[in-house]
Image (cartoon, rainbow, N blue to C red):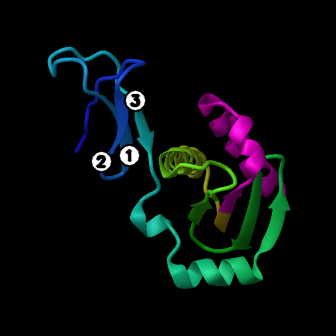
Amino acid sequence: MPFFGYVTPQETSDVSCGVGVVRWDYSHSPTSLLEYIYIPMLKKNQRLRTASFNEVFRLGQRLHAAHFQVIYLKSADFHASVVVGKKVHKTAVARNRLRRQVYGALYRAAKAAPLPYTLIVVAKPSLKTVSAKGVSPLVAEVVALLRAR
């Protein structure tokens, strides 16, 4: 079910809606749609469970990039998890926003071409300096490196 949000630079917050996240603006009436932003998320069955996470973390190969470390295992289906620690952002709101952005970029990459991997994407503290619009190209670059292996 689609969910619409009102967006302006002031008084906005993120609202989760099933398989995506929208930004909702509290300062305008519901009749004035300013801009609709939809950040897709991975489906729940594509995210890693705890047992799988521990197995991939222990047995997986590692790929280091400037802003991410990717731990991966070859698999038949695509599964992923994103880890953003307190060294990257101090507040949970900022960490969750970054996590959603990375999940969205992974969703788009997996939708464009199949990824036969189980991934754990760990954000490095250097990601703190990257703007919100710069996260998606960085994830796409890491996915391209992964596909080249």
**What residue sits 60% from the left and 50% below the top?**
90
Residue 20: give its label.
Answer: 1
**What residue sits 58% from the left and 44% below the top?**
105
Span of residues in magenta: 121-149
Task: Bin the neighbour count of mark 3 within 10 Å (Cα to Cα): few under 14, some 14-19, many 20 and up.
Answer: some
Counting residues from the N terminus, which is met first, the one under dot 3 or under dot 2? 2
- How far from the left and from the top, in percent, is residue 107? 53, 50
Q: Are marks 1 and 3 in contact (CB under 8 Å)?
A: no
Counting residues from the N terminus, which is met first, the one under dot 1 or under dot 3? 1
Query: Looking at the figure, which quarter contains the C terminus?
Result: bottom right
- How far from the left and from the top, in percent, is residue 108? 55, 44
Let me know if residue 75 appears in the view: yes
Q: Regarding mark 1 in the picture, which secondary structure is present there?
A: strand
Residue position for label 3? 37
Query: How far is mark 2 from mark 1, CA to CA?
Result: 5 Å
> What is the three-letter code of the residue carrying label 1?
Gly
Is 125 one of the magenta-colored residues?
yes
> What is the three-letter code of the residue carrying label 3?
Ile
Q: Are marks 3 and 2 in contact (CB under 8 Å)?
A: no
**What residue sits 61% from the left and 56% below the top?**
114
> What is the three-letter code of the residue carrying label 2?
Cys
Q: Regarding mark 2 in the picture, which secondary structure is present there?
A: loop
Q: Vertical placement of 123 versus 9: above or below?
A: below
Task: Bin the neighbour count of mark 2 within 10 Å (Cα to Cα): few under 14, some 14-19, many 20 and up.
Answer: some
**What residue sits 62% from the left and 56% below the top?**
84
Residue position for label 2? 17
Q: Vertical placement of 57 versus 21: above or below?
A: below
- How far from the left and from the top, in percent, is residue 127? 72, 43
**Main SS type for the magenta part?**
helix
